[in-house]
Image (tube, rainbow, N blue to C red):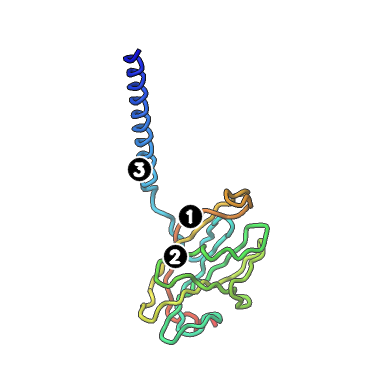
Amino acid sequence: MRVLQSLKSRIAAALAGIGTLVAAASVALYGAYGKISRGAEPVFAAGAAIQTGQWRVVPQRAWTASGKAYGVPVKPGATALVLEAELTNRTAESSADYLGVFRWNAAAGKPYVVGLRDSLQMPYLQPGLPERVAFIWTLPPSAAAPAQAAFAVASKTYKPIDNLYGAPGWFNPAVVGRVELPVAQDGAKAVQ
């Protein structure tokens, strides 16, 4: 009887060990699959329409400003990088959830967003109505203004019910491509 129980425990231990190895191998395979290069991300130019889930984005141009840029003050000696774009709200409600649509990998932090029609900061954009806005990053005085800038374009996924609150919303930002634009030096003088 003792031999039979010993055999059962050995078989159970062997099966548990095999199951653990299979689980570890599947995790390793899924991890390796996630790291596989899925090709180059799309690169968009000025005037290209980009669908990002809740927004339709059309980047226009990028330029620097050494003074005020659409009402956003720039400290003396500092420079601002301005990205002008046309945004269309594709949802059914007014929204100002566009702060993360463009990401610029520089030490400038988060941008100010100004509506070009009335120079209002962080305006709510109405559904289906295209609006020109400016994303403005303030560069530190020691940073040189770039001649070319690449902005990551992020998209979010709509969930009718989220896991935390059970409310609908746009979640899980993911980069869908990048916009590469030449940067005009003190281009604000030609616009304002």
Q: CA distance from mark 1 to mark 2?
A: 13 Å
Label 2 element class: strand
Indicate left or right for 148 with 153 as reference.
left
Going from N to C along the chain, the mark reached first, 2 or 3, is 3
Q: CA distance from mark 3 to mark 1?
A: 19 Å
Label 1 element class: strand
Query: Tag 2: residue type?
Result: Phe
Quickly name the residue at label 1: 174
Quickly name the residue at label 2: 151
Q: Are marks 2 and 3 in contact (CB under 8 Å)?
A: no
> Where residue 168 sits: x, y (%)?
63, 52
Quickly name the residue at label 3: 32
Residue drawn where x is 36% and y is 19% of the image: 8
Residue projecting furthest to the top: 1
Q: Name the mark on residue 144.
A: none
> Where residue 26 sits: x, y (%)?
38, 36
Judging depth in this view, the residue of 183 and 100 nearest the camera is 100
